[in-house]
Image: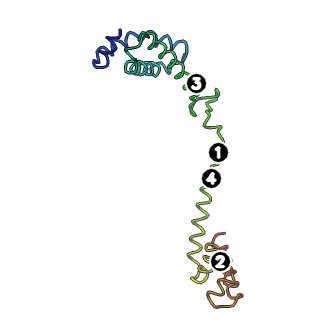
Amino acid sequence: MREKVAAAREDEKIKLEIIKSFEPLIKKCFKYYVKDINYFNDTMQEGYLILLKCIYSYDINKEYPFVSYAKSSLIYGIKNFAKKIKYNVSLDEPIKDDGGCLYDIIESDFDLEGEIEQKDNIKNLKKALNKLTEKQRDIIDEIYFKNKSMREICKNRRCHYMTVEKLKERAIKNLKEQIY
């Protein structure tokens, strides 16, 4: 068998022969460890991959027979594969007879209705801001978007505090009328 494994590294037909000779063992491992018919083809493919790795990683100079090496690799490889798929759960998998699925019961922090409402509010605010006078828009921008204090604004504009205050009040009153 050592010569056959060495030749299989170069010849595709010999690789296929070796793989075909281990198919009953792959099917038996499927029966014992995986059991879910939906994973039959995946298990077979996993077994083929394990065998191909065995062909290339087997040390021909060792006393350990290839058949034993491949057999133990297949058994443990398919056991690990079964463990991996055991925890695979689809969100679309039905969980009740009434047609519900996991996706329906998973809680989410995302609020679609709230997100849409917030976008509508922002659009309305932009429209309302565009309807303000330039001075009012500048005051709202400096106070609420640039976080400037009323004193800073007064100092930069060289005007009285009450002038800025009255401008801000009129701007807010106009915004409320536009939005509500």
Q: Nearer the viewer, mark 1 or mark 4?
A: 1
Q: Position of residue 87 (x, y in %)?
A: 59, 27
Q: Check whether the beta carbons of the residues at disc 4 and disc 2 lie within 8 A of each other.
A: no
Marks 2, 1: nearer the viewer: 2
84 or 38: nearer the viewer: 84
Disc 2 and disc 1: Cα gap in Å?
37 Å
Reply above or below: 122 against 59: below
Disc 1 target residue: 108
Q: Amino acid at mark 3?
A: Lys
What colour-coding does the image apply?
Answer: rainbow
Say whether residue 160 is left or right of residue 132.
right
Q: Quadrant of residue 85?
A: top right
Q: CA distance from mark 1 to mark 4?
A: 13 Å
Is 114 drawn above or below residue 89 in the view shown? below
CA–CA distance between discs 3 and 1? Answer: 25 Å
> Which residue is disc 2 drawn over?
148
Q: Badges 3 and 4: C-beta atoms under 8 Å apart? A: no
Identify the residue at image location x=67%, y=85%: 164
172 vs 91, nearest the viewer: 91
Q: What is the secondary structure assignment of the residue under circle 2?
A: loop
Q: Which label sits on residue 113?
A: 4
* Mark in the foreground, 4 or 2: 2
Left or right of 27, for residue 7? left
Amino acid, disc 1: Ser
Percent x, y of residue 20: 37, 12
- Tell whether label 1 touches label 3 (CB within 8 Å): no
Mark 4: amino acid = Glu
Does dot 1 land on a helix, a strand or a loop? loop
Q: Which residue is mark 3?
A: 86
Disc 4: CA contacts within 10 A as few (<14), some (14-19) or many (>=20): few
